[in-house]
Image (spheres, helix red, strand yellow):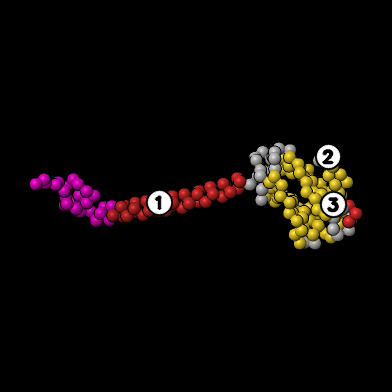
Amino acid sequence: MERIDYKSSGPYNSILSGTFDPFEVGWNLVRRLSLEAVKRREKIVRNIFLCIIFVVGLTFTEASKANDCVVTDWKISAKVQNKKPLDVRNTFTVKDSRVSAYVRINCTQPVQNTEFCFYRNKAKYACVKLPVKSPEHWRTWASVKALKGSWMVRLRIDEREMLTDKFLVQ
């Protein structure tokens, strides 16, 4: 059988050696309990930190999906001819027959589509969704029949609202 030398082993060797110091025993116990508590707290803090990083990462991913497009030209006109808006104004008559919303955008990231939503007297009248073929210096337009009322048009690019404008048809 192997004999264990208790005098030189363990944190309580002062008890076995006959030089019992209750302060040392108490301090060792407090230190050991405190170390375990600190380790537990570190683990909890680390887990909370990792959860926060994870959530922020998800949020950043969602935010990065939003386009970086900039509207470089926006006009409301009576017509578009040769891909350019003509007769630009904000008040129209029924005789104009149609009202067009024209936009030119510039994006550094690819985008899928543009949506023009027209509202007549605060009620949704029509939405026109158009594909974006080239995000750099791209232009498009949509038009509605010129019916009497107070109108609003909203431009969205890939679900991001870019701008809202108003016009009147008398």
Which stretch is magenta?
A: 1-28
Q: Amino acid at mark 1?
A: Lys
Q: Name the spot of residue 170 as percent of width and height, x first.
A: 89, 58
**Closer to the camera: disc 1 or disc 3?**
3
Tell me how far mark 2 sits from mark 1, CA to CA.
66 Å
**Can you see residue 141?**
yes
Asked if residue 48 lies left or right of residue 93, the reply is: left
Q: Name the spot of residue 38 as percent of width and height, x first.
A: 38, 52
CB-based contact (under 8 Å), mark 1 and mark 3: no
Tell which circle, 2 or 1, labels the residue nearer the N-terminal end. Answer: 1
**Can you see residue 27?**
no
Residue beneath the point at 65% across and 40% down: 110
Residue beneath the point at 84% across and 60% down: 149
Identify the residue under disc 3: 98
From the viewer's side, name the closer residue of 10 and 91: 91
Identify the residue under disc 1: 43
